[in-house]
Image (cartoon, rainbow, N blue to C red):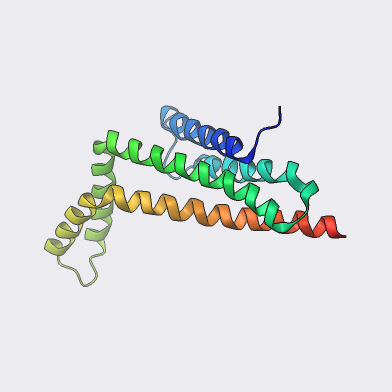
């Protein structure tokens, strides 16, 4: 059975979520390159969605296949991100505390009181900021990968 791009996006998103769930279980450090596996799966999923459609050769139809894939995968990652941070307020507090420590070490033109207030504001808006970052990251990467792959395949078909 040939899967359409939407289903491939669903599979890609699920694989990315599984990778996101496995890494903390393996106690992977935050600065480990293994955290890029989600992006590798994402790019591979987009290529998987576009490549079988290369016989259509038109850039627009190829881009459409990639677009449908990366929109579904991005939606799943946004839902996962929201659930992850909502379910882990302790991790959120740790992240905000680490950021506050760094800012206190290099205060610049801010007072400790201003840094403390900024940490409180960060905590308040943490989940919306993380979700906005997730949306922006995955949509940008999706557009770049889709454009590159669709453009390459449509040009190679013309030659």
Q: Position of residue 42 (x, y in %)?
A: 57, 43
Is residue 39 something that shows in the picture? yes
Q: Where is residue 141 in the image (x, y as percent from the top left)?
A: 55, 54
Q: Where is residue 27 in the image (x, y as percent from the top left)?
A: 42, 31
Most distant residue in the right direction: 159
Is residue 33 something that shows in the picture? no
Q: Quadrant of the C terminus?
A: bottom right
Q: Residue at x 24, y 38 (%)?
A: 89
> 39 or 154: which is nearer to us?
154
Image position of 89 (left or right of 46): left
> 127 or 55: which is nearer to us?
55
Q: Residue at x 61, y 46 (%)?
A: 43
Image position of 136 (left or right of 98): right
> 48 or 6: which is nearer to us?
6
Q: Where is residue 46 in the image (x, y as percent from the top left)?
A: 63, 45
Q: Residue at x 65, y 37 (%)?
A: 4
**Is 16 placed above or below 43 here?**
above
> 5 or 123: which is nearer to us?
5
Q: Which residue is drawn at 52% across and 57% down?
A: 140
Most distant residue in the left direction: 113
| Numbered marks: total | 0
Q: In which quarter of the image is the N terminus?
A: top right
Image position of 80 (left or right of 151): left
């Amino acid at each position: 059975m040939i899967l359409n791009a939407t289903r491939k996006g669903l599979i890609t998103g699920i694989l990315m979520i599984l990778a996101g769930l496995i890494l903390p279980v393996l106690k992977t450090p935050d600065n480990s390159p293994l955290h890029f596996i989600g992006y590798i799966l994402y790019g591979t999923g987009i290529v998987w969605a576009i490549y079988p459609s290369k016989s259509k050769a038109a850039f627009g139809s190829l881009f459409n296949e990639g677009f449908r894939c990366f929109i579904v995968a991005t939606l799943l990652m946004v839902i996962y991100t929201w659930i992850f941070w909502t379910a882990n307020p302790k991790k959120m507090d740790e992240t905000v505390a680490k950021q506050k420590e760094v800012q206190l070490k290099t205060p610049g033109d801010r007072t400790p009181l201003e840094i403390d207030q900024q940490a409180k504001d960060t905590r308040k808006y943490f989940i919306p900021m993380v979700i906005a970052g997730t949306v922006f990251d995955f949509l940008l990467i999706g557009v770049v990968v889709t454009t590159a792959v669709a453009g390459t395949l449509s040009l190679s078909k013309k030659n």
